[in-house]
Amino acid sequence: MRPGQRRSSWQVHGMLALALGLTAGCAASGPRLAKALMADRDPAAHGADIEDHYIVHCPDLLEVDTAGRLDDNVARPVGADSRIPLADGGRLHADGLTTPEIARAVADWLGLPAEQVHVGVIEYNSQELYLFGEVAGGERPIPYQGPETVLDLLQRIGGVAPGAALGNVQVVRSHVADGTSPELFQVDLKAILLCDDQKTNVRLEPFDQIYIGQTKRSSLEPLLPPWLQPLYERLTGIRRVGTSNVAGPD
C-alpha cells in the first residue's frame, strides 16, 4: 500500500471515530430531548395567570367584554395619551395597568359588578423578546405576552432547530431602562424537562434576549465531505434538505 493510500485510510477512520464520539457525547441533548421539549404543550398548566400579570402599554390592542353594556366587538387601542376609548366617548386610563386592573376600572366607570367585565389583549404590540441561535423559525423578535417561563416560550414558538444544544441556553437581561448591570441566566433544559427541576426555568421579562447554542455535531456537519453525509445522517438523526437541516427519525 502506497503512503498516500495509508494516509487516506487513517483519515477515513479518524473522521468516523470523530462522528461516533460526537454522537455519543450529545445523545442527552439530541432529538429525544427536543421531542420532550414539545411533548407537554399546555401553557395554561404552566402559568394560568400569565396574561393577568401582563402590563399593558401603548400601542397594545385590547378587547373589553361588558355583558352588552359596550359594543364588545370593538378593538380598543391604548393611545399615546395612555387611554382606551369607550362607547360613550370617554377615555379610560390603561397604560401601566394589568388587564384585571383595567377591567375593574371599566366596571367602576359603567357601574357594573366587577365579575361582569373582562379585559383581554388582542395584540401584544408594545414589548418584545429577542430570539438568537438555533430556534425554530430563525432569529427574530417576538411579542412579549407576560412573565412566561423559558420552557413556555420555546413551546410557544414551536421548539428549537435540529442543531440546537439544549444544554447551552442563556437568557440575557440588559437592564438598559433602569441603568443597572446586565444579568446572565443559564438555563438547564435537560434538568427542567427530564428531572422536573425548575430552578433555572427563568420567568421572562420584557426585552429579554434568549440564546440557543449549537451542538458540536451540527457545527461539524457542513465540513463533512459528501461521501460521509449518509453515515452522519444515520448516526445523528439529522438529514439535509437543500441547505437546511431537519431532524430525522429518533
Image (cartoon, rainbow, N blue to C red):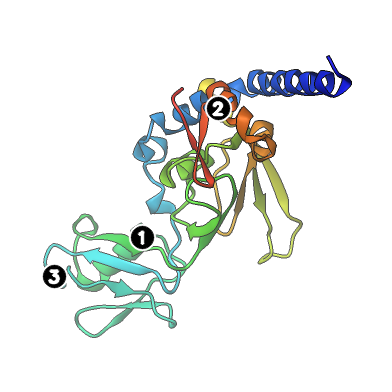
Compare residues 176 and 115 and report the one nearer the observer. 176
Placement of 238 over or under 49, stated as above or below: above
Residue at the (28%, 61%) spot, across then down: 119
Which numbered disc covers residue 99?
1
Where does label 2 land, which residue? 230
> Circle 3: is it few (<14), some (14-19), or many (20+) Cα within 10 Å?
few
Which residue bears the numbered disc 3?
A: 69
Disc 3 is placed on an element classified as loop
What amino acid is labelled 1 in the image? Answer: Thr
Question: Mark 3 or mark 2, which is nearer to you?
Answer: 2
Q: Earlier in the sequence, mark 3 or mark 2?
A: 3
Q: Quadrant of the N terminus?
A: top right
State whether residue 206 is above or below residue 91.
above
Label 1 packing within 10 angstroms: few (<14), some (14-19), many (20+): many
Contact flag, marks 3 and 2 (Cβ < 8 Å): no
Determine the residue located farthest toward the left in the rendered image. Answer: 68
User: From the viewer's perspective, is residue 191 above or below residue 98?
Assistant: above
Distance between the alpha carbons at the discs numbered 1 and 3: 18 Å
Residue 53 coordinates in the image, percent (x, y): 43, 53
Mark 2: which amino acid? Pro
Q: Can residue 55 be seen?
A: yes
Q: Quadrant of residue 215?
A: top right
Q: Secondary structure at mark 1?
A: helix
